[in-house]
Image (spheres, grey):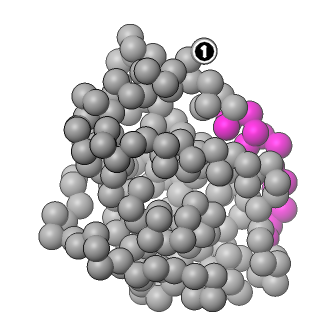
Amino acid sequence: MKFLLTTALLASLGSLSLALPSPAHQDNFTPAFTSSLDDLFALLDSIPDSVLEEGDEALNQWFIDNDLRDPAAELLIDSSPEADPALDLGDLDVISDENLERGVLVARASAWKIAKCVASIVQLIATTAVPAAKLLKIKKYIKALGGVKMSVKLLLGATTKAEKLKAGGKALVYLSAELLGISSVKAACF
């Protein structure tokens, strides 16, 4: 069952509520969306760091072994430039709900925009040879931002670098830089 997770995620995205989120509402995700979002980032989190540290071939084999990628598939090559290697992953700000200015940021992130963003990331994982080092960095940024839901809220809500710094600190700026280098994700998420 190739791409089982991808298919399940895309199917569950179809059941999302398309209502715009209310800034006064504290959690703007429907149960169906929360489930697919959790599944997506659970997939990223399930990739062992040791596999990512081994490199791209090990990552590709892990995707194949876990039926997330067809072994015969011709993969697109991630040609995005690498983020600044001088970035210090150990000096990331940890984000809490209190730091998110919901009235300004969450109001911008409609459920449909979030769904498109999640779907583009799922497609990227299934069809693109993303360097293992890039996925390892992305995992660390998501963890530093307080997890899956908070990362997506912050990414979609903060539009300028200044807003990203204020809402999510260095981790959000670095995560944005990694994802902005991938054109399909940039088009769907930003």
Q: Extreme left residue here?
A: 86
In the rendered image, the vertical position of residue 100 relative to residue 5, given as above or below: below
* Residue 94 colored in magenta in the image: no
Classify residue 171 as left or right of residue 79: right
Quadrant where the N terminus sits is top right
Along the line of sight, the residue nearer the viewer: 140 or 105: 140
Query: Where does residue 53 sit, x and y in percent of width and height?
Result: 25, 45
Along the line of sight, the residue nearer the viewer: 81 or 129: 129
Query: Where does residue 11 sit, x and y in percent of width and height?
Result: 74, 33
In the rendered image, the vertical position of residue 112 relative to residue 147, given as above or below: above
Q: Residue at x 41, y 65 (%)?
A: 141
Q: Residue at x 39, y 28 (%)?
A: 62
Query: Where does residue 9 sit, x and y in percent of width and height?
Result: 67, 37
Q: Residue at x 39, y 43 (%)?
A: 48
Residue denoted by label 1: 1
What kind of residue is marked 1?
Met
Question: Which residues are drawn in magenta?
Answer: 9-21
In the rendered image, the vertical position of residue 67 relative to residue 5, given as above or below: above
Classify residue 137 as left or right of residue 88: right
Query: Where does residue 97 sit, x and y in percent of width and height?
Result: 63, 82
Q: Residue at x 82, y 43 (%)?
A: 15
Mark 1 is surrounded, within 10 Å at the Cα level, by few (under 14), some (14 to 19) or many (20 or more) other residues, namely: few
Give the main secondary structure of the magenta stretch: loop
